[in-house]
Image (cartoon, rainbow, N blue to C red):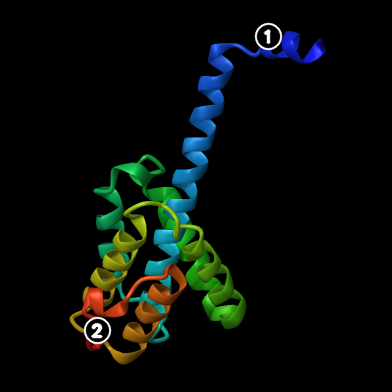
Amino acid sequence: MPYRRSLRRFSKRSWEDFGDEVHRAQNEHLMEGIVAGCALVAYADGWVTTEEHDRMLGLIRGFEPIAAFGLDDVTATFENLTERFATDQKGGEAAAFEAVARVKGAQRYPALLVEACCAIADADGGFDAEERAAAIRICEVLGLEPADFGLADAP
């Protein structure tokens, strides 16, 4: 019964390490999804303002599940995405929406992601049509109703 011997050797500490790695991976997906959503909305009008960038960092700083990644990792993820939008719009958007989609089944986080995106859009003093369209598309990817976030007229 080699299986049982292997199982016995797999210590409690190994399970804890594995659990920590899974938790970090889930939080990394969450961080990437939220940052990708913010980048999509911030870049929707063709550029990212300082206010949008700073608002995104402020929101992340106060969000415990992903604040542990540090502002350097968050900033690098955001800047990599927005640079990709500038050089390969379709590829960048596809990668960003893929990251957003990974948050879909994560309890309350999809709604939080949309709320963060709306806060980013409003950071520069307005929520223009392109930003609204990006936020609505994010809602669609996450299976959420845009009207629940004030993004569309309620039916």
Tell me which residue sits at (47%, 64%) in the image: 100
Q: Is residue 14 above or below residue 56?
A: above
Tell me which amino acid carries mark 1.
Arg
Question: Local crowd at mark 2 within 10 Å, few (<14), some, or many (≥20)?
Answer: some
Name the residue at 54% across, 13% down: 12
Q: Residue furthest right?
A: 2
Q: Earlier in the sequence, mark 1 or mark 2?
A: 1
Report the residue at 41% width, 68% height from top. 37
- Circle 1 SS class: helix
Q: Which residue is mark 1?
A: 9
User: How busy is the neighbourhood of tag 1: few (under 14 within 10 Å), some, or many (20 plus)?
Assistant: few
Residue 87 lies, in percent from the top left, at 59, 79
Residue 127 versus residue 67 in the image, above or below: below
Q: Amino acid at mark 2?
A: Phe
155 is higher (above) or lower (below) than 40: below
Image coordinates of residue 28 in percent, x first then y, are 48, 47
